[in-house]
Amino acid sequence: MSLKLKLGLLMLTLIALLSGAFWVFTRNARQLEDIAARRRLGQVMLFTSEKLALGKLIAQSNLPDKNNAIARVVDDVFLMQAAVNTNLRIEKRTEIATSLRDIQTSLSTISLLLQDLRARAATGQALTQEDVLRLDQLDAIVSKVGTTVTEYDQYLNAEEKQIKKTANLFTNIIVAAMVATLIALFLIVFFNILSPINALTRSAQEITQGNYAHATNLKSKDELGKLGNAFDTMTSRLREFIGTLETRVAERTRNLELAAEVGRSVLQVRDLNVMLREAVEIIRSRFNLYYAQVYLANPTQTTLTLRSGTGTVGAELTARGHSLPINSASINGRAAVEKRPVVISDTAASPSFHPNALLPDTRSEMAVPLIINDRVVGVLDMQSDRAGALNQEILPAFEALAGQLAVAVQNANLLEEAEQARAEVEKQTVRLVHAQWQDYLDAIHKPEQIGFAYEQNRITPLSETEAAQPLPSDSSLSAPIAVGGETLGSLAAELNEQSLNPQARELINAVARQVARQVENLRLLENAERYRAEAEQASRRLTREGWQEYAAGRKADDLGFLYDLKEVRPHESAADLSSEPAAVALPIKVREEAIGSLAVQGLNPADAASLELVATVAERLGAHIENLRQYDRAQSALTQTEKLFEASRDLSQAGDLQELTAAVVAALDIPEINRAVLAIFNYDADNQINSLDIIANWWNGTGTEITPVGTHYPREVIRAMSLFVSPTPVFFDDTHADERVDAVTMQLVQRQNLRAVAILPLHSGARQIGAVILEAEEPHKFTSEETRLFTSLAPQIATVLENRRQFERAQKQAERESALNLISQKIQSATSVESVLQIAARELGHALGAPLTIAQLGVKERGDGGQD
């Protein structure tokens, strides 16, 4: 019997006992409740009998409310009858039932009597002697009820004791049965569960301690017996597995050691091709393989190219440039795509294996991807002539080897890239040093060749002829003077035979290196000095030009002042005090550039303190007025920026091209400008300017009338006035005195009465789309602020102009589309061919403004054989 069945039977028994106990307790409770109910009925009968005795006295009395008293007695009789009837229904004891039936009969008789007495009492009749005798029966009934109730109560007590006794008996029996069942359950659990579990625990402990020969010895047929048998079987298999584990571990350790040895050998080689060739040969020989090869992936990760293979087959495939696409069609391609090894232990049983005619003896193959940072750099492919030689057990060794090989490939690639970068840097350094020394020895600041010879205790310069003649090689030592890999010269010494030794050669090389470093340092120092001087010169030039520009915008009497011990007044430059013989004049300098002078008359030149004071004042004066000029310049730039902002706002708010041109003139605010035109260029198929059209103009109403809008200038006229289509801004202060104006252009200038002209080209991207031309009939000196402001407006004017042209083109296109849509709707609404032709002719004539429009159909043959 199984353990499950045993436990099931015990549980069913326990459930049956619990059910029996519940039934006994329930039945006992019902019986006790029935006894209590019957006892309550006896108490009701006893209480009612006492009331009947009281009713008798009331019936025999002469009370005024006698009728009602008798009625209450009748009700008590009825109540006792109900109690008696109830007891009769539930009472099973004969003696009690007989007494209750006698009481019931007597109560019926008394009930009739009382009703009769009630009726007579209602009519006022008195009781007769017979009535009194009949009422005495109440006493007998009351006595009978008392006796019966006492007996009834004794009976109920006895019955209650019997019920409790029976209940206690059943309870003891059930408890004993449950205790026996629990004892049986414990015995079953102990002998059938705990004991086998302890045996299994001991077996597990023995196995943990290495005793794989221990058995559980469980002979039972239940579940635990089966578990013990399975445990014994597992122990036996584990014993067999551990017996062969040492062999497998030793083999795997050998494979890992071989992989580590191959990895160390590979990492010691820097050249990629040599490293791969040695790697595949070592792998083939160490692991006793049939063939080994390495593929490398191209930068785009689309192709695997064979870089090295073993034997003549590998050499042949490498020479042919054998390659494979990176896809699942081949074993190596699938390994690269899936980024995991592909192992075919038996090629004869694998449908994915594709034999190679050059390798007919392949029986197992393994392809392991070379991965660096989740990127496949190649595939290591190995083949064996024995089925099962390449399997999952040996895979970890080859994965470790593939990881080392991938690192070696990456290191070789990085080393190659570093070598290429180093070589490129060296080449760049050589070119840079060569160019710098060419600039240094430029035959202007330094001669192209410099050399000196020490002979007979004298230093003499070398001529070009002497420098070109080398010393005899058999009796001299020389070393190059090189900087950054570029040979700039040489250091040579002619020695006797005794002095020609390695120490002398080392000395010459060391001195040559020192000379190279020193001459390079001196060149850098001289270049720095030269650049510093050029920077100072540029600074002085900028200062001079700035003050010249500043002076050009000032009046002559604003640039000099005179103090005559009474007042300070403007001083014209023509009356220079420095020409006075008794005056001391010192220059006012800014960045070593003289911008003026400070002259003091009546100063003693021998007074050093006064001269020092004047010099100090002149120095501070120069610095201060330079600060003031810079401040004026900053304020001027700020003003120009505000003008540019206002001009940009006016340009963006211009309603049309006329307002745009007027806004440009207003932004410059040059009184001499009285005319302005906005021209646009037209290009031919060769992207050359073909013509020029005036699309907007402005005229203040004075002088020569402006060129009207719509004026067209063909290519021939444009070629004659090329200055007006210049791609860069052009300013003419006075065309009559400007050498850039040729004879042809002068004719146009004179015809238009042009003296001052400003031409601003407009570009959209790299294409010149037009120009803004400002004209004046009087000469005007364009200041730098005006030219900068005018030039700064060009991009905004071009943008507004291009947007306007795009809008006009879009508007015209919309009008054409609208007209075409209207004509199409009218044509489609026609119901006859004649109506279609009439509508087409009329609407097309209206749309084009043509004086004559014809729409006709016809298939009549012409005389020349054609058709209309």
Image: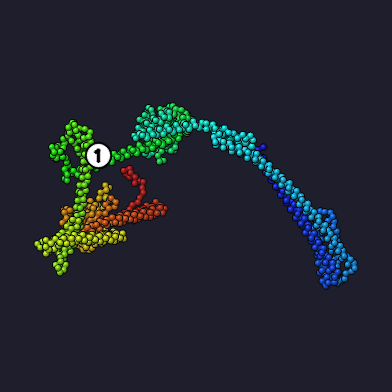
Residue located at (87% from left, 65% from top): 136
> Looking at this rendering, what residue extends furthest in the right direction?
129
Name the one closer to the observer, 617 or 65.
Answer: 617
Compared to 299, does 764 lie above or below? Answer: below
- Is residue 214 visible in the rendered image? The answer is yes
Tell me the crowding category of disc 1: few under 14, some 14 to 19, or many 20 or more residues within 10 angstroms, Cα based. Answer: some
Q: Position of residue 321 (x, y in %)?
A: 36, 32
Query: Which color mode does the image show?
Result: rainbow
Q: Position of residue 213 (x, y in %)?
A: 57, 32
Residue located at (70% from left, 45% from top): 178
Name the one closer to the observer, 634 or 156.
Answer: 156
Residue located at (76% from left, 52% from top): 164
Horizontal arrangement in the rendering, residue 427 relative to residue 26 (left or right): left
Secondary structure under the numbered disc 1 in the rendered image: loop
- Is residue 305 visible in the rendered image? The answer is no
Say which quarter of the image contains residue 544. Answer: bottom left
Q: Position of residue 866 (x, y in %)?
A: 33, 44
Residue located at (78% from left, 51% from top): 162
Compared to 334, does 173 lie above or below? Answer: below
> Looking at this rendering, what residue extends furthest in the left direction?
581
Count of labels in the image: 1
Name the one closer to the observer, 714 or 844.
Answer: 714
Residue position for label 1: 485
Horizontal arrangement in the rendering, residue 77 relative to residue 800 (left or right): right
Q: Position of residue 811 (x, y in %)?
A: 34, 56
Label 1 amino acid? Answer: Gly
Say which quarter of the image contains residue 635. Answer: bottom left
| Quadrant for the N terminus in the image | top right
Compared to 270, does 522 lie above or below? Answer: below
